[in-house]
Image (tube, grey):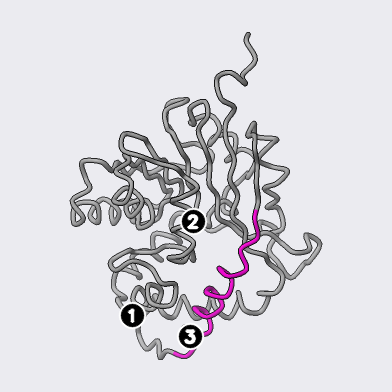
Amino acid sequence: MARSAEEFDRWYADRTDSPVADALVRRVLGLPPGLQSTSLLSGAGLDEVVAELGLRDGHVLLDLACGRGGYGLEIARRTRCRLAGLDFSPVAIEQARRRAQVLELADRADFRVGELTETGLRAASVDAVLVVDSLQFAESIPDALRECRRVLRAGGRIVVTCWEASDPSDERLSKRMRQVDLLSQLPLAGFVDVEVTDKPAWRVAEKALWEEALTIGAGDDLAMQSMQEEAQRVLATFDGLRRVLATAFTPSSDQVPSA
């Protein structure tokens, strides 16, 4: 069952009160100081994502399902792009706005409540779309990818980090995880030059994070309690998933058939 915005609101509220959880994630995943992660993308993975996005000053990046905005804000800091961040959790969006102020990036970052399948953005209004570890939460993955395609300009690119089932018939895994198949779903959404690459090194970092989380006394820390519960679930089926980085483009103007 897909988790609701209300559940994520509680998760983000709990995370605010847990410097232990944030420090653990930054240290084990090798993230930049101060980056408030909401996923499992490592620092090395972030470097790869930035290179794949190919952003520069003046470009617009849509960070879809942005959470607290950590990755998008770091990318905006590095590339000087403009940032549009969307998430269905109002609590996460408010935290992202506050973080943008702290980092003095509020003039280039616009955070709004929105859905994976319904961003509310104009067609052909962004140069790149980033979806970090969240596509599986969409009510319809094909609809979410079509929405990404709609808001991208001609020649724009999408970068997705996610997991896919090693065996889609493995019933230990949730239905939503077994439905991710980016190599077939991205072309059906209208993307070209699709590449889906296994990232086993990212999985090593993830496993280290979950295993270390279980060694820490959670006490009354709700975020650590939640992390430990998730660690137990994830590690029970860890071998059933593969980590992937997917990249694709919208057709350039000379590839679009005339009406």
Q: Which mark is residue 212?
A: 3
Q: Residue at x 68, y 52 (%)?
A: 180
Identify the residue under disc 2: 48
Residue 157 in percent (x, y) is at 52, 38
Query: Which of these two is toward me, 146 or 140?
Result: 146
Q: Which of marks 1 and 3 is in front?
A: 3
SS type, badge 1? helix
Badge 3 crowding class, 10 Å Cα cut-off, few under 14, some 14 to 19, many 20 or more, is: some
Q: What element carries label 3?
A: helix
- Frontmost residue, 56 versus 141: 56
Give the quadrant of the N terminus.
bottom right
- Which is more N-terminal, label 3 or label 1? 1
The disc placed on residue 20 is: 1
> Percent position (x, y) of residue 17?
29, 73
> Residue at horizontal 32%, vertical 76%?
18
Looking at the image, is mark 3 or mark 2 nearer the viewer? 2
Q: Is mark 2 on a helix, strand or loop?
A: helix
Does 124 sit left or right of 179 as displayed? Answer: left
- Looking at marks 3 and 2 on the same chain, the residue that comes earlier in the sequence is marked by 2
Vertical placement of residue 58 versus 113, above or below = above
Q: Is 218 displayed left or right of 118 in the figure?
A: left
* Part of the protein shown in magenta: 197-215
How crowded is the residue under tag 1: few (<14 C-alpha within 10 Å), some, or many (20+)? some
Three-letter code, disc 3: Glu
Q: Is residue 213 magenta?
A: yes
